[in-house]
Image: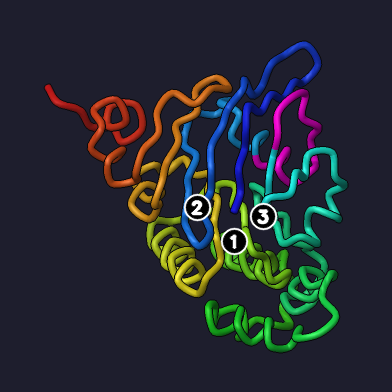
Amino acid sequence: MLKVKNLHVNYGGISAVKGISFEVPEKSIVTLIGANGAGKSTTLRTIAGLVKAAEGEIEFLDENIIGMDTIDIAKRGITLMPEGRRVFSNLSVLENLKIGAYLQTEGIEDSIRRVFDLFPRLKERSWQMAGTLSGGEQQMLAVGRALMAKPKLIMMDEPSLGLAPLVVNDIFDVIKEINREGTTILLIEQNANKALKVANMGYVLETGSITLQGKGTELLQNEKIKEAYLGTSKK
């Protein structure tokens, strides 16, 4: 579904992404893991059209989307769920969800019902101001708002960041359910253990370059991954 080829992205004189290539097959979960500053968020923002690439190609459904406006990329079925939730605090849960459907002309009520089925707590709080929700509920709302666009590919940037362990489990259960329903997912996640357990394929980014890649289950067993990201290694 998505093919990134030799992608280079610069910020001023700094090379943030250095010629990376990877693929996201349709209906799969692919994760990018790495330390802060590795280039993960920059990669997603470039795919979404928010950052300009210096070089390379990004193909979505066999169409090169490099240089397209963000709105045109979104119309093709790519949705970015940014880090930090970024809900509209002074709007209700329901109003936030409807904003997520700004490109849709029909089926909005069906999409809202789908979100409420995934997140019953959001249904209970549908008229509550988003800014008064807990951190976990705001993250649920961010996921729900992204789903309102009916994306073919949803890109999630750190969905578990700052959440309690039980809420993290809930979020990853929903990620798996969204994928089972047919939505392709490109996931950035510092919780490498959780990410690799759900991912079909994983890529490790270090200072703008891909240094390791493989099936999620294989990377979980990799000694370098265990030491650097899982806090375990052979003694």
For the record, the magenta segment spans 44-57
Question: Residue type at mark 2?
Answer: Ser
User: Disc 3 designates what residue?
Assistant: 61
User: Disc 2 designates what residue?
Assistant: 160
Is residue 81 shown left or right of residue 50? Answer: left
Could you tell me how far apart the alpha carbons at marks 3 and 1 are, in whole angstroms? Answer: 29 Å
Residue 190 versus residue 62 in the image, above or below: above
The residue closer to the viewer here, 124 or 173, is 173
Residue at point 84%, 70% (across, down): 102
The residue closer to the viewer here, 138 or 43, is 43
Q: Secondary structure at mark 3?
A: loop
Instruction: Name the spot of residue 60 as percent of width and height, x first.
Output: 68, 50
The N terminus, quarter of image = bottom right
Q: Secondary structure at mark 1?
A: helix
The residue closer to the viewer here, 189 or 219, is 219
Residue 166 versus residue 9 in the image, above or below: below
Between discs 3 and 1, the one toward the N terminus: 3
Residue 222 versus residue 68 in the image, above or below: above
Q: Which of label 3 and label 2 is nearer to you?
A: 3
Residue at point 58%, 34% (across, down): 40
User: Disc 1 designates what residue?
Assistant: 139
Between discs 1 and 2, the one toward the N terminus: 1
Between discs 3 and 2, the one toward the N terminus: 3
Is residue 132 visible in the rendered image? The answer is no
The residue closer to the viewer here, 170 or 58, is 58
Could you tell me how far apart the alpha carbons at marks 1 and 2 are, in whole angstroms? Answer: 8 Å
What colour scheme has been applied to the protein in the rendered image?
rainbow
Magenta residue check for 97: no
The C terminus, quarter of image = top left
Question: Residue type at mark 1?
Answer: Gln
Give me the disc on residue 167: none
